[in-house]
Amino acid sequence: MKKIILLIAVLCTVQVANAQRVFALHAVRIEGNLEAFEKVETELHAKVAQDAVNKGDVLYWSLSKVQKPNQIDVPGEYNYVFAQWANNIDELLSTKSAWWANVDKVLSPAESEQRKTLLASYKWVKDTRNVFVVEGEAYSPGNATYVQFNFGRPANISGFIAENKALWKPFFEKNMSKMNMNIWGVARRLTFPTMETSHNTIMSWDAFASLEDLMKYRIGGAPLPGYAEVVQKTKMATYMPDGFTYAPIFKILKTTTPKK
């Protein structure tokens, strides 16, 4: 598996409270035998990632696939994304989080040989990696299957985050179960791989039990309890007048289980 960049120089100058959870998003473009790629990641590399979680070196790892209408592939676009979480920035930057270095220690000789054969049938065309610090989260019982990432560039980042924590988080906590929503969160981006100034600076996410539930959430419908009050108080049109710039949907293919 290609190296996920975790040691990024810019992080050395960013002041982040150790109590805040962080995660790295690694989007990739895979071409060739996609079934082989998914088998390597969900059956073999996931085993190594789970070993790291069990040892406390990694908090959480997942692989998700871009969900397109009729699964139509767009040449050149990223088609998978990895996520790796840590309790704080120190854990994320630790050499222990590079769990892929333990492939030969965790996999059996037969699995290693299978991996070698499968790796030869596809290639990584491009990838991009970024680190985010979590500003707010909410959970509801159940297993999420589809997740929507919402990227944006607020005119007022601190105002955007403060409102999400004070206004939208309580609303989602009260209504998640009614929407079959399992996870909600908002994060601030810490890394920027180029000098371009148009990069998104924040990301929120909404995870659901099914694609149908997620799409109903996108469509909207009967106002949920407290929604009118939230709309009346929100200043989101001021904080982020252009709205979210990009909101892709992903199918979650594999996740690690929490450390026992």
Image (cartoon, rainbow, N blue to C red):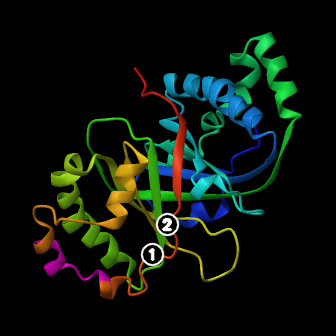
Pick the quarter of the image with the N terminus: top right
Left/right of residue 216 with respect to residue 252 in the rendered view: left
| Residue span colored magenta | 229-236
Q: Nearer the viewer, residue 87 or 223?
A: 223
Residue 247 tag number: 2
Residue 244 tag number: 1
Left/right of residue 178 with respect to residue 154 in the rendered view: left
What residue appears at the point 77 percent right and 43 percent down from the top-left corner? 2
Q: Is residue 5 visible to the viewer in this orientation of the structure?
A: yes
Pick the quarter of the image with the C terminus: top left
Report x, y in % for residue 187.
42, 61
Q: Is residue 104 magenta?
A: no
Amino acid type, callout 2: Ala
Left/right of residue 247 with respect to residue 144 in the rendered view: right
Report x, y in % for residue 252.
52, 42
Residue 118 tag number: none
What residue appears at the point 30 percent right and 80 percent down from the top-left corner? 236
Considering the numbered disc 2 on the image, is that residue within a helix, a strand or a loop?
loop
Report x, y in % for residue 228.
12, 73
Q: Is residue 68 visible to the viewer in this orientation of the structure?
A: no
Residue 212 vs 234, above or below: the answer is above
Q: Residues within 10 Å of mark 1 (few under 14, many from 20)?
A: some
